[in-house]
Amino acid sequence: MSSRLRSRWAGVVRTPVGMSATALLAAVLLLAVLAPVLWSAKANAVHTDQIMQGSSAAHWMGTDNLGRDLFYRVLVATRLSVELALLATVIGVVAGLLLGTASVSLGARAGRFVTAVVNIAVAFPGLLLALFFAVIFGTGTKGAVLAIGLAIAPGFARLTHTLVATIAGRDFVAAARIAGVSRIRLLVRHVLPNVGEPLVVNATIAAGGALLAFSGLSFLGIGVRAPDYDWGRLLGDGLNGIYVHPAGALAPGVAVVVAGLAFNLFGEAIAKGIGLRTPLAGERRPSSAPAYETPARPAPAGEDPVLVVEGLRVDFPGAGGPVTPVRDVAFALRRGEAAGIVGESGAGKSLTALAIAQLIEEPGQVHADRLEFLGENLLDTSARTKRHLLGTSLAMVFQDPMTSFNPIKRIGRQLAEVAEQHQGMNRRQALARAVDRLRAVRVPAPERRARQFPHEFSGGMRQRAMISMGLMGTPALIVADEPTTALDVTVQRQVLSLLRSIRAADDVALLLISHDITVVGQVCDRVLVMYAGRVVEDLPTAELLTHARHPYTRALLAAVPDMTTDRDRPLAVIPGRPIDPANVPAGCAFAPRCAFADERCTRSDPALVPDDEGRRVACWNADLTAGQPVAAAQRGRTTSQGTAGDE
């Protein structure tokens, strides 16, 4: 156990409430172990001459209808009461974990069905569910345990599902998927450890609830049966003579309350000690995307391309039909080539990258006329082959390095897992490879850094470590999704320089996604400009300032200030707002924001066609912009509605 974990749990008992709850719960558990050994004989001794006696020095809580001492019977009943409550809690927690993690372990489609069933079950009160299951399983100890356990499960499953959903979307989980980690291993190694603390808190409190519920079933006569007895059965027996012998009902009632309070207070103490707030327990229609006059085809990538994308489309279900945030994207990359994708937020840049990496999960659907990586068709390849191919030959660098790593695992172990999964290395070899890869991306003292947790790295070092994870295999393509967004300018330059050096040294293709068109211009050979889910221009970065023909590209360039920008004049902006993917207008999507738009633009969407030099542009009036200064792309058309994206 790490010192951090020990100090965190020590915080549970430092507060007065935590200390009291811990002592009370320890006393209950100790009593459950020792009481049957010490006092079973006294509790079961029958004295027919002392039937239904009141409290006295000989019998502190009096006797029952057979003259047995009630005080000792309550003490001895502690074991069975606690055992059954804990057993029911274990059943409920295990069933809840299985149901709550179905979306990860079984897949999105089966997970949605299981979640729907859980949501229906949560709508019913727990006691009603317990009674329902008790009727199914029958009366007695076994039936009551199963009934209470299954009554606990829906609430625990709902909590688990909510917590897992917050982790399953993190970048480090996506990175693990790319590395080829199986669903079960992904769940056990990456997801559950990050949600374990609130689940422990809830399970502790659920144990107190199970104790009360089990006592209630025994009180109703459908729980523990004679000759066994627990607190609920003793309470039911004592209630019959409460007016003449109140102590017979008081003693087991107090025991139930005290033990239930011990579990609940301990759960709350855990929540406060570890800084948590405890949650409450409880056929396809055709796409409506606009059709193009001619299909878009990628620019030639030379012999043996690394990546070929034709007609890529990503669909999600929507209220009015499929929503298509990525439409007919086409491009190709050869070895050693660097291409950048730029555009405003919502243009479809990141979804394009995720579709290439096969990280779009249901209900999202990826369609393409052609999607090949290293000659393999990613849409038809078997899951095992695809997992190995992407895990070893494609490196994904995500936007936020802090969410790219599992926060509870050391950096070295997370990198080593890739080598263990795909290269057959043992633990020692994989760790040595991890240290070597950290050294390759210029992380100082890599042996020491490999033993540290992600929070001990600076932002730049975390991004370097993320790049090193991609280099654990032999990548042919690096997909970098906004790799410098969260970094300052100095560190940004270092990361970009690192990507350039890796590309040059190993002949690796690079696909760089960025809001900043100037960053792409510094690093990449080509730039793909995306708007409303499709590529509207594709040209060499060296020709951005001189040969950009699409008004949107020129507007992005005009919106970037430089040292010659007049500070006394307002910054250039792109008027209006980006298009909603669920409501793409007819014609050119950029027409409402374009100074050159005419009737043809609003009627028909232009195809992405190449010119004699291989540059591609999707614009009816592209020739009108040729020869004009970049800043003239939006001259005479201003509005206060929008800005230049995030440029």
Image: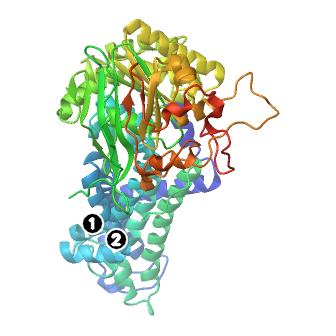
Residue 438 lies, with reference to residue 316, above or below; the image says above
Q: Position of residue 64 (x, y in %)?
A: 35, 82
Q: Earlier in the sequence, mark 2 or mark 1?
A: 1
Outermost right residue? 568
Residue designated by label 1? 145
Q: Are discs 2 and 1 less than 8 Å apart at CB?
A: yes
Label 1: few (<14), some or many (≥20) within 10 Å? many
Looking at the rendered structure, the secondary structure element under dot 2 is helix
Residue 42 lies, with reference to residue 187, above or below; the image says below
Quarter holding residue 216: bottom left
Q: Position of residue 243 (x, y in %)?
A: 45, 93
- Seen at 61% across and 27% down, the residue is 487
Q: CA distance from mark 2 to mark 1?
A: 8 Å
Q: Position of residue 38 (x, y in %)?
A: 36, 59
User: Residue 385 vs residue 163: left or right?
Assistant: left
Residue closer to the observer: 347 or 196: 347
Quarter holding residue 574: top right
Residue designated by label 2? 214
- Seen at 57% across and 29% down, the residue is 516
The colouring scheme, among rainbow, by chain, secondary structure or one colour, is rainbow
- Amino acid found under the numbered disc labelled 1: Val
Looking at the rendered structure, the secondary structure element under dot 1 is helix
Label 2: few (<14), some or many (≥20) within 10 Å? many
